[in-house]
Image (cartoon, rainbow, N blue to C red):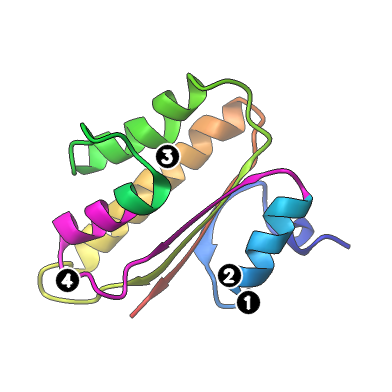
Amino acid sequence: MSLLSTVSPNAVQSIRAFRSLDLQTEATVTGQHFLYADCSYTQDKLQVLSCVAVAFGFPEHFGHNFDALYDCLTDLVHKSGSQNGFVIVVEHLPNTEHFDKEQRETLLDVFRDAADYWAKKKVAFRVFYSFE
């Protein structure tokens, strides 16, 4: 049984039950993109978005805001051709006064919106996250 078979094809969830290395292996075996960002050194929204942008290979003109994140996760990737699916891991999101609960939820909402976008195209888009 596939590690990902227990996870909805378009989900955003805590990584608790999984290890990032196992998810990477599963993505490779199933021919999906694996994107990983370790945000352990970040403290605020700009640093989190910069970490994700660098880790995911976003273009230099990335706007470092939530709308730009959505655009890169959807439109930019969609323009690159057909996709087999995505397994995304964003670990150690900060829990600081400069990246508070509202900003964390907004970030996760962007990933949820991207998951909805890819669901309409019948492409798996799974995001796993952890907080500091």
Disc 4 marks which residue?
A: 43
Q: Which residues are magenta?
A: 30-52
Describe the element under mark 3 as helix, strand or loop. helix
Describe the element under mark 2 as helix, strand or loop. helix
If you read the primary sequence from the N terminus, does the residue marked by circle 1 or circle 4 appear first? Answer: 1
Describe the element under mark 1 as helix, strand or loop. loop
Disc 3 marks which residue?
A: 113
Q: Is residue 40 magenta?
A: yes
- Of the pair 63 and 107, the residue shown nearer to us: 63
Q: What crowding class fits label 1: few (fewer than 14 Cα within 10 Å), some (14-19), or many (20 or more)?
A: few
> For the residues marked 3 and 1, what is the alpha-carbon distance in whole angstroms?
23 Å
Q: Relative to residue 105, is residue 118 depicted above or below? A: above
Disc 1 marks which residue?
A: 17
> For the residues marked 1 and 4, what is the alpha-carbon distance in whole angstroms?
25 Å
Contact? badges 2 and 4 (CB < 8 Å): no
Q: Residue at x 58, y 20 (%)?
A: 81
Question: What residue type is disc 3 on?
Answer: Asp
Residue 42 in picture, x, y percent from top left: 22, 69
Disc 2 marks which residue?
A: 20
Residue 117 in picture, x, y percent from top left: 50, 31
Viewer-nearest of labels 3 and 1? 1
Residue 3 found in image quarter: bottom right
Q: Residue at x 47, y 29 (%)?
A: 77
- Of the pair 104 and 69, the residue shown nearer to us: 69
